[in-house]
Image: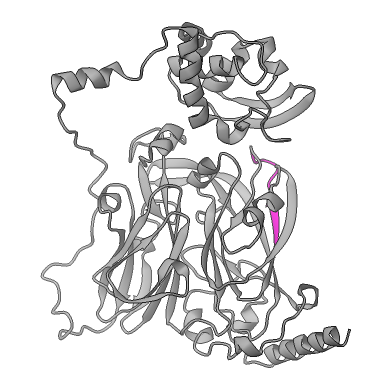
Amino acid sequence: MKLHTIAALCASVFALAACQQPQTSASKQSAPANTAPASDAAATASSSPAPAAASAEAEVAAADLPVIEGVTTFAPEAPPPVNRNHAARVKVKFEVQEKVMRMADGVEYKFWTFGGHVPGPMIRVREGDTVELEFANRSDSTVPHNIDFHAATGPGGGAEASFTAPGHVSTFSFKALQPGLYIYHCATAPVGMHMANGMYGLILVEPKEGLPPVDKEFYVVQGDFYTKGKYGEAGLQPFDMEKAIREQPDYVVFNGSVGSIAGDNALKANVGDKVRIFIGNGGPNLVSSFHVIGEIFDEVRVEGGTLINKNVQTTLVPAGGAAIVDFKIDVPGVYNLVDHSIFRAFNKGALGQIRATGPENKEIFSGRITEGIYQGEGGAVQTVPLTASETAKAAAGAPTAASKDDRIRLGEAIFKANCIACHGAEGKGVEGAFPPLAGSDYLNADPKRGIQAVVKGLSGEISVNGKTYNSVMPAVNLKDEDVANVLTFILNSFGNKGGEVKPEDVAAGRK
């Protein structure tokens, strides 16, 4: 009891000390969410990082921590430094929104988002803080969502605790045990689809002593997107699962769209500024080779951790990972941010810019002969010619089933590639979200229902084995042969009554 009282007194002293500090960004940390100022705040608040000594800080129970509202920001703005010398319970609110937004000029895409933006809000806390998240899924969402914090220690990073159906809200908390820059993302099945639709962001857990001061901080996340139409094809472009599985994106972009931080949207800096970029990679598939053309990173916090590398030209950022890069602007001009897997920059959109203004320094750089910016080269793709036999082999396509047994065998592979994430290896589905295929009275009563669900999608209430499901299954882009094979596999597996679906049945069902 005495120890508990002493700990509580220590927490009160720390809280009082924080209140008596000058009114810089420390006071902003307790402002309402999503109200952080521009990234210039880094120059003030981080100029005097909290002097806390990790070894001397008293351990305080989560229930006794002072409660503050977390400050979150949308890209490219980064939240101000924490500037606290004590732990706190930081409350954050997220709302999931499924929203049609711009992918490129003339191109729209239905993103699944945290807070209506891609990436989602950036969170900034201190090592030892307890993060409490209120996670709301809007009633007009089509599917359940959740969140996996790579900064959290616990099952699924919070995915299980935050699994939330449309129209519901969940709350959970975790202690930020280790400093670093971490990705968070939706982890609802199919996980890849949720991430490919833009459900990711960054959380920075500052070390107790804070980060070294800089003048500008920016928040940037790379992502790869998979659309039915090719790069630049106008209109509302649906998600293409087949391309995603093949890891062949049409778009690779920073902050959710082509040109999000280029041209009129370029990041702004001045000559002499120390610049920090919190760079994340939401994936879901590609590793980023992050590079700023015309700059050398003075320091890179490798993979967002405590290892510091110096004088780096290009740094790898894995899918589901992050890095912190610091550099100084010595001369004015336009500095291009790219994924140096370079076709992604000039043909798929992974290009941003920092526009720096200020005096020239001819000793460092003599200047340009001409002035301009990099322009996208478009999405045209060259092909490699094939021999006659290779052309014939490619035209033949995938093998076709010669018997019902062949159809079951081929269908099993299609099931594992396309269906297992939602319906499970044993066809049991997910309670309250995805209906079971095992012993399904819905499918056994009429196999044509399966054809309609696969080729046209399925939404609205259905009853399966006495339980009601009201979710959305998107249409799956499979050939008639593949649909017939996977449905035949399902009908002859998981305790179902058997049967065979043929390609001509599928063709008739498409009409």
Left or right? Give the position of 416 relative to 91.
left
Task: Give how far across and how far down residue 506 sits, in percent.
Answer: 50, 11
Task: Give how far across and how far down residue 424 sits, in percent.
Answer: 61, 33
Residue 134 among magenta residues: yes
The answer to whether 316 is drawn above or below residue 300 in the figure is above
Q: Is residue 294 visible?
A: yes
Residue 99 among magenta residues: no
Q: What is the image's colouring? A: one colour
Q: Residue at x 33, y 69 (%)?
A: 354
The answer to whether 276 is drawn above or below residue 200 in the figure is below
Left or right? Give the position of 170 relative to 403.
right
Q: Nearer the viewer, residue 357 or 200?
A: 200
Which range of residues does the magenta coloring cover? 133-141
Please tell me in which quadrant of the rendered image residue 381 appears: top left
Q: Residue at x 45, y 47 (%)?
A: 102
Q: Residue at x 79, y 86 (%)?
A: 7
